[in-house]
Image (tube, helix red, strand yellow):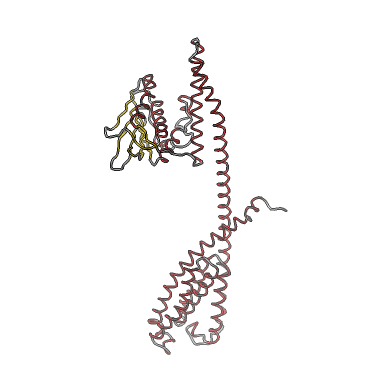
Amino acid sequence: MGMTGQELGRNHPEVEKIFQQQMHEIGIRVDRAFAFLMLIQWVSCVFLGASITPFTWVGQFSGSLENALVGLVFGGLFALPPIYCAWVLPGQKITRYIIAIAQVCFSILLIYLTGGRIETHFHVFVSLAALAFYMDIPVLWVAAAIVVIDHGLRGVLLPISVYGESADVEWRWIEHAGWVFFENIILGLGIQRIRAELREMAFSKFQLIEAREEALRFASLKSNFLSNMSHEIRTPLNSILGFSDILRDTTLDEEQREYIGTIHRCSDTLLHLINDILDISKIENGLLQIDHHRFDLKELHQDIHKMFSVKCMEKGLELELAMDEGIPNHTLGDSYRLRQVLTNLVSNAVKFTDSGKVRIEVRKDREARVYRWNVKDTGKGIHYDNIKKLFRSFYQEDPSISRKYGGSGLGLMISKNLIELMGGQISVDSKVGEGTTFSFSLPLEEA
């Protein structure tokens, strides 16, 4: 029978590559942990040689200084090579084997320095358990083999050096070997289970990478499609707007003039939507460019005020423009994008305010060297839970908003991205039933 898609995926070379990378990273961390452990064990061997060994059977032949020297010399021989490898060749197979050999050699040395005390034999089992963190079963068996060979040789030739007694106990090494093998089997089963789980994690990561790449490809295709279609639609739409303007200046009866007005308004709305889609496409693809030119800051705000004055009068709203006296006439920046942001924010403020006023505030923060804007309204306000969602594409607080007020839900998302591209920040403060304030800052230079 053939393999399923899942099985083929698990055998993909990239899955193996991710798995090996995971194992390599684990190896690096364990190598460095063992490097510190080697230093601690080296110091411990010197201390034991000076303070404990003279009171064991070894003390019959040597004193504190000699045994401390044994701990210093042999401890150094066991500690320095793995420490060097851990920092120069981290995560390499050779480093694992050198550390495994050195670690069980420390166990053997500690057993000797304590006169074969049974408690010290537990260091062997702890060493094997620590080496299991490598998730490498052959490393465990190499370490176990060294322990068994050492116990076998010394257990037959000099049992007292292993068991702390001189009786006829040379065959006890077989019992010790049995316990070492038993621990290795248990550790090996655990390692196999963990490696299987790590391989599953590698497969899941591979799936996520593939899904992300597929999503990026789809997003690129979508953006290119939107960009191309938007350009294709804008050409005839501009012609419709142009001819509707020409028709409006001809001799028309009242009904015809109303029809032309409807055509013009609908075309203008559609053109704004297409422009928004184009901007979104450019933002997503990182193609939107910010210009840097000299412009009249006060004139720009007066234009915005004039643009929305008629609409505010129709709704019975006050439209206020408050600019600090210290603001210069001319600054350097992108006037087109600043106008776009203000138009979006003021348009929303007017749209969602049925009574009261809309206020545009501009001031210069000389300490922070930025200009700050507040667009305040006395409208319906925004629920706290929905504020953080406002700057998402196509988001509107209530589905009925689109039916009642129109709009695509792209304006705030575009404004946020434009402000950030110009080096600024935007925030929202709102209370339901009291109104909303959109605040943003931009680092404009005086011209």
User: Which residue ends up furthest to the right in the rendered image?
Assistant: 1
- The answer to whether 340 is drawn above or below residue 215 in the figure is above
Query: Who's the residue at 55% across and 68% down the image?
Result: 93
User: Which residue ends up furthest to the left in the rendered image?
Assistant: 325
Give 431 or 184, whichever is nearer the viewer.
Answer: 431
Give 327 or 5, whichever is nearer the viewer.
Answer: 327
Give 366 or 162, whichever is nearer the viewer.
Answer: 366
Can you see residue 301? yes
- Indicate the position of residue 34 as horizontal and vertical percent values: 46, 69
- Indicate the position of residue 297 as horizontal and vertical percent values: 34, 32
On screen, residue 23 versus residue 446, left or right, reads: right
- The answer to whether 96 is drawn above or below residue 278 in the figure is below
Give 14 or 250, whichever is nearer the viewer.
Answer: 250
On screen, residue 64 versus residue 146, left or right, reads: left
* Quadrant into which the C terminus falls: top left
Can you see residue 179? no
Question: How many numbered marks have been drawn onto this rendered protein structure?
Answer: 0
Query: Who's the residue at 51% across and 61% down the image?
Result: 25
Q: Quadrant of residue 155?
A: bottom right
User: Which residue ends up furthest to the top in the rendered image?
Assistant: 253
- Indicate the position of residue 48 as horizontal and vertical percent values: 40, 79
- Indicate the position of residue 277 as horizontal and vertical percent values: 51, 33
Q: Quadrant of residue 11?
A: bottom right
- The answer to whether 358 is drawn above or below residue 111 in the figure is above
Q: Quadrant of residue 384?
A: top left
